[in-house]
Amino acid sequence: MNVTHEKPQDSERWSWLFGGIRPVTRSGAVRDALAGITLAAMNVPQALGYARIAGMPVVTGLYTLLLPLVAFAGLGSSRYLVVAADSATAAIIAGRLSQIAPVASEHYVALAGMVALLTAGCLMLARLFELGFLADFLSQTVLVGFLTGVGFQVGIAMLGEMLGVAVTSNRTVEQLTQIVRGLPQLHVPTLCVAVAVLAIIFVFNRLAPRLPGPLFAVVGAIAASAAFDFPAHGIAVIQGVTGGLPLIGLPNVSWGEIPPLLAVSASCFLMIVTQSAATARAYAARHSQTLDENTDLVGLSAANAAAALSGTFVVNGSPTQTAMVERSGGHSQIAQLATATIVAFVLLFLTSPLHYLPRCVLGAIVFTIAIGLVDVRGLRDIRRESPGEFRLALITAAVVVVIGVEQGILLAIALSLLWHVRHSYRPHTAVLVEHGGQWQATPAVPGALSGPGLVIFQFGSDLFYANAGRFAADVRGLIEGADPPVKWLVVDAGAITSVDYSAARVLTNLQRDLIRRSIALVLVHTESSLRADLHRHRLIEVIGADHIFDTLREALAAISGHRVHVLPAINPEGGHQYR
């Protein structure tokens, strides 16, 4: 029979384009455009602050709100996710690039652009190989610790500008030392301006959170600086802000400079995948919308490629800016397109006043961002519910502050994996005992019995090379201290979905030991994946197919009916040696 494949219609082939915008209605477009204007008012001063965190010229912060937003709006699937500059990725960039080139220099900007381009490549590879699952390897616990550490690091870095104290070091501990030593020389006018900006932002956040407090602070500071000539009073201002749209081109970086940037790009990639996926998932679930995470990876890759080509730095899905859009009434990426339009207008006609913007004002804005990253409530909740994970969060935060952001993100991933492995290595175990007609879990201590001569043992993890020895030791502890002696060992395998090669060898030796002790081994609640492993490792022959049951009820009925017996001895090659 001949099978013909119809070519997809053009409308179907390109249906994924502008998925975060369509369908478009007139009322919805107006509502989203107004939300985009609000987002621009909120975001312009923050973008300048993010550029300061990244060590980039301040105008490049505005570039992150231009082409990257347009690229994600066209190629992403999330209707809410705002892709722009982010404090975490900005801190990762500065932590490494500041050791290679002078901050905000032309070479530094080129290196930052190459990091964005390499990150775009990583994101596209993640899409091609469907590596979006990597987002799940950074637990919420260590993510809270990581962002808290970034908050402290960024906040300390801004104290020098807010106090008017010279800070030359790139390391947080040394920066704090220099600030403390420089306190006798602090510049009072600079401090007063910074405190006034902090007060304005906090008052607006408390009394009118929907209004752009940072924008009012920036406009007021620029007006005051121009009117009272702040530079004449020793208050440093931003200089050399270039207006106009960004020039398009590849970063001017030699091939030999790329290898040191790969680790920075990998760290940015992991943070982007984790944070963007978590944010997009949350808002899609809240509004009962479908989300294609693979399409979002394409959008994020395009956004970072656009950032690289337009002379700015890595962009990320921002939880705070996404929340701004939602609170402002936005329901699609039209809001982000409106933001990009406003930013283009600012770049073309309104960059001149930025020459009067005091540096301490940017420092104060960044400081408020840093305070928002310190998740005190989240840390308190983790400490109350899981003290062990709380210690992991603190360790991650300390590494970020003392060693660096790049090392902190790698440690965060390693700790997340180790915490999971620790739970798998030492899983929950129990002995089931019947009370009032129901089976209840009791501690699996030596000698615990489910009934005369019967042990029903629960093991709460897959069996693999690391925990198989613990499984065997727990079983031997149960049977050696039992009185009366154990005749039947029933393993509730409901949580055991796989057995690896090493664990299979341990189980074979354990079964041999049980046979010598005249104890029958029985498995219940075996899933299809576990049965496949039992066949592959020939454990079916070792345990006995008639000793494996779907339910505990069936196993107990077989035991009480004397249909379960101790198997013959096992020969060294596996299988049974019948006597």
Image (cartoon, helix red, strand yellow):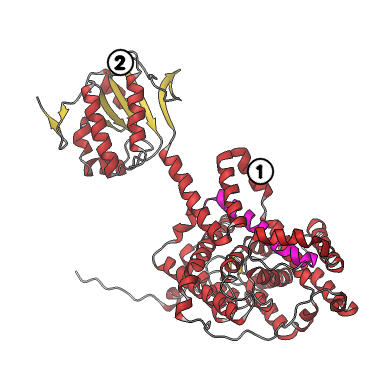
Circle 2: residue type:
Pro
Across and down, in percent, residue 376 comes to: 68, 48
Which residue sits furthest top? 484
Residue 233 shown left or right of residue 311 in the figure: right
Nearest the viewer among 156 and 20 is 156
* Image quarter of the C terminus: top left
Q: Which residue is located at x 53 percent, y 59 percent? A: 407
Percent x, y of residue 382:
61, 43
In x, y percent, where is residue 166?
75, 68
Residue topped by disc 1: 380
Q: Which residues are magenta?
A: 139-164
Q: Is residue 491 left or right of residue 540?
A: right
Out of 179 and 353, give the one closest to the viewer.
179
Residue at position x 48%, y 82% from top?
254
Mark 1, secondary structure of its residue: helix
Q: Which residue is mark 2?
A: 485
Name the image quarter holding residue 45: bottom right
- Dot 2 or dot 1: first in sequence order is 1
Q: CA distance from mark 2 to mark 1?
A: 48 Å
